[in-house]
Amino acid sequence: MNSHAEMPEHSKVTFGFWVYLMSDCVLFAGLFATYAVLHTATFGSPGARELFSLPFVLIESMLLLTSSFTCGLMLLAAHHHKKHFVAGWLIVTLLLGLSFVAMELREFAQLISLGHGPSTSAFLSSFFTLVGTHGLHVALGSLWILVLIAHVIVRGLVPGTLRKLACFGLFWHFLDLIWIFIFTFVYLFGFIAL
Amino acid sequence: MTLTRYMLGFILSIVLTLTAAGFVATATTLSSNVVAIVLVALALAQFGVQLIYFLHVGHEKKPHYHLTVLTFALIVVCIVVGGTLWIMDNVNRGHEMPDIIEMEASALTPRY
């Protein structure tokens, strides 16, 4: 089984990026804690159970999870120096990520149009902030993919590009990890009215 | 970092996600606390699966810097979330027991 020791020239950078991700973890912890405290403060309006749709959220989860998998496939291709497969899997990951963002934007727009915007209640403020911050991360990650595709095509899989791809891989996998907890504590707990 | 590991992680994650969703949809007779515990267990399991199979945590060479920093971050997360819930629960309890607050307030009021 191969380990990351095969790419020692960027292990310091990927570790530094990992430390950044851990700080991002703490950021999300604060947002989760806020949501946990405020999620019952609906100000008389409908709560999580009435506003969210399980099939919709399940599709979002599958999109993001699959994109994390294709990101892994991309990293494998990079490991085997298959430049065109790297570009290909980057594009697939991008499409899945953009689909996720599109679904989330649709959900937000629908909530706002029904009067359940982020300023309506503390529950909605904390919901939009938590889920929105995660969505923003995915959107910016998608932008990053575009840059990476350009790097891969123009410069090929040189050490610098491999380093960037490794950092991106950590970032994208991390976003799916955070989503597991959003899916569970925001949506699933919402459905059981906890 | 092999294809097998990624595929295993992917399939396990799908199973855990669908199990959680299915459980919520069908376990309507169980108490919400029981359902909550099951959901948290499934979430933590998937968290572990993705950490190990996607992020290769624990499979790095010694010293395990990634694992160390992750552990520290998780401790901070537990303090932030757990501490917040504890404190807010305490604050809210204050509102629910006005008798105790009046008793304590009157006990603390100096009597001349």
Image: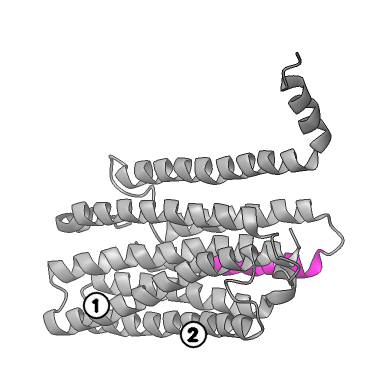
Is residue A122 covered in magenta? Answer: no
Residue behind mark 2? A102
- Both on one chain, marks 2 and 1? yes
Residue B101 sits above or below residue A49 on the image: above
Judged by depth in the image, the label closer to the viewer, 2 or 1, is: 2
- Secondary element under disc 2, as helix, strand or loop, is helix
Please name the amino acid that badge 2 sits on.
Ala
From the top left corner, tell me how far across and down residue B10 is, in percent: 50, 68
Residue at point 61%, 40% (across, down) = B87
Residue B94 sits above or below residue A164 on the image: above
Query: Closest to the observer: A27 or B2?
Result: A27
Residue A166 appears in the rendering: yes
Residue at point 77%, 51% (across, down) = B33
* The N terminus of chain B, quarter of image: bottom left
The quadrant holding residue B76 is: top left
Task: Please provide the residue range marked out in magenta.
Answer: B12-27
In the displayed structure, does residue A158 sit left or right of residue B84?
left
Q: Earlier in the sequence, mark 2 or mark 1?
A: 2
The numbered mark 1 sits on a residue in which chain? A
Disc ID at residue B86: none
The numbered mark 2 sits on a residue in which chain? A
* The C terminus of chain B, quarter of image: top right
Residue B22 appears in the rendering: no
Please name the amino acid that badge 1 sits on.
Leu
The quadrant holding residue A110 is: bottom right
Q: Is most of the magenta stretch helix, strand or loop?
A: helix
**Mark 1 crowd level (few <14, some 14–19, many ≥20, 10 Å Cα):** many
Residue behind mark 1? A148
Instruction: For marks 2 and 1, give the CA distance.
Output: 21 Å
Query: Closest to the observer: A71 or A110?
Result: A110
